[in-house]
Amino acid sequence: MSTVTVQPTGITPADVLAVARGDARVVLAPAAVDAMAASRRIVDGIEAAGRPVYGVSTGFGALANTFVAPQRRAELQHALIRSHAAGIGAPMPREVVRAMMLLRVRSLALGRSGVRPLVAQALVDLLNADVTPWVPEHGSLGASGDLAPLAHCALVLLGEGWVAGPAGEQVDAAEALRAVGLTPIALAAKEGLALINGTDGMLGMLLLAIADARHLFAMADVTAALAIEAMLGSERPFLPELHAIRPHPGQAASAANIHRLLQDSRVMDSHRDDLAHAVQDAYSMRCAPQVAGAARDTLDFVATVAGRELVSVVDNPVVLPDGRVESTGNFHGAPLGFAADYLAIAAAEVGAIAERRVDRLLDVTRNRDLPAFLSPDAGVNSGLMIAQYTAAGIVAENRRLAAPASVDSLPTSGMQEDHVSMGWAGAKKLRTVLDNLTSLLAVELLAAVRGLQLRAPLEPSPAGRAALDALGPAAGAPGPDVFLAPVLAAARSVLAGPDLRAAIERQIGPLS
């Protein structure tokens, strides 16, 4: 098992993936412990001096001007967590909750939140004991950060609330802590607020989405190339000199991938010198790198935003090294909400153009001599007709999901919090768009494989052969109709997993 060490300088996207998906162990660096202890001493000094400071000696939100007596400040922090753990709906996936908890540890470890080190350590202990709080899907507006989701995590530290059981069921938090030998903690001044005032949920989802999108955008080049090959398309639109004159880096990378994927193909050789062949391919073929490349550039922008957030102090108020405690708006999720919406738009279009290639592959009037719906006996058999229906329905859903969440602010807390980011909703729907994109590319993979099978005895490209080897056992040979849902599920598994890409890269080198 790998180990992620949380430093006072932050963590990396790879660290988040290792903990969220790889169950890496988490430890706090001694320097992080020292940074937290130093900021806590400042908060203790404020308490001793009796100064009014938001979240330390006052209420929250619209109650910011309400002074809280010293003897009730611990009670204030506990009440805050209980009242804010107000989510509703199905539980968030384990990987999202683990990413969120690690990112809150990261934020506390920067030493600007004024919490005792034991608070961050308590979150670390939950991660290492594989105790996952039950976090409902609804509750966050993305400002002041992901309050409700983080409160559901913090409530477990107090021995209250729910955790997710082995089968996903709700388990009493106190019972779950006892089972792994952990003891609830009691919060001191400022600590409850510090546990929930952050963008950790939306950032965690965005980091997971970035990793998924990187794989899917590379596989979109693979499925596009296979479909183009099966439709006897041209490789000439993907020549590097044609993309050098429009220097978008993502476009050049995607075109280079597709061009290499189409080499060493007897299918491509069969029509290269055919003067009767189409002068220009359809946009869905010829413009594949322009669309997928723009999505790649969008992804690079989103990764930059997420990288900045990973080194940011996201809390309110923040404790500065000179002893000042200042209110900020750094918890506002607009940067992440905008990024999630932007990436959802890009991913939706990668899926939409893939569906257009599927439709073309199945259409006997446009697929260059392949049988209707890729069935050798169309009429009695429907081939992949309804697989394209499924893809079309998913494209329609992705178009609805691509509508931005970040323009949909609703005021809360007696108009104190009068503009919110909706970043949680944006990141959540982004994950749905990417899941849908996986299915869309799986349909294209299956259609392309079937098309290449029907081009036999012509040998496909190395990428085509790898795809036939990977999906052939589930897809079978072209013939009478079969129960198609399991075949689509197998195509989705092949598309989402690493093996097909690895097999292709062994033949042609790394894909961009």
Image (cartoon, rainbow, N blue to C red):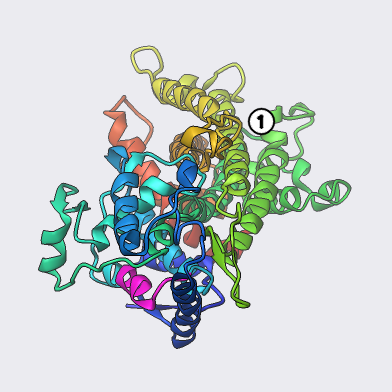
- Estimate how packed mark 1 is, as few (under 14), some (14 to 19) or many (20 or more) residues with alpha carbons within 10 Å: many
Q: Quadrant of residue 226?
A: top right
At 52% from the left and 38% from the top, the residue drawn is 422
Q: Position of residue 237 (x, y in %)?
A: 77, 41
Q: Is residue 498 left or right of residue 270?
A: left
Residue stretch in magenta:
114-124
Q: How many marks?
A: 1
Between 459 and 61, the one nearer to me in the picture: 61
Q: Is residue 170 left or right of residue 18?
A: left
Q: Position of residue 309 (x, y in %)?
A: 59, 60
Q: Quadrant of residue 163?
A: bottom left
Between 215 and 355, the one nearer to me in the picture: 215
The quarter of the rendered structure image containing the N terminus is bottom left
For residue 407, above or below residue 102? above
- Kindly identify the amino acid type of the residue bearing the numbered disc 1: Ser
Res. 355 visible in picture: yes
Magenta stretch contains residue 254: no
Magenta stretch contains residue 123: yes
Q: Position of residue 233 (x, y in %)?
A: 67, 35
Between 18 and 222, the one nearer to me in the picture: 18
Q: Main secondary structure of the magenta part?
A: helix
Under tag 1, what secondary structure?
Answer: helix
Which residue appears farthest toward the right when viewing the image?
245
The quarter of the rendered structure image containing the C terminus is bottom right
At 63% from the left and 48% from the top, the residue drawn is 335
Which residue appears farthest toward the bottom when viewing the image?
30
Res. 476 visible in picture: no
Q: Position of residue 465 (x, y in %)?
A: 49, 51
| Disc 1: which residue | 284
Between 333 and 427, the one nearer to me in the picture: 333
Q: Is residue 151 left or right of residue 47?
A: left
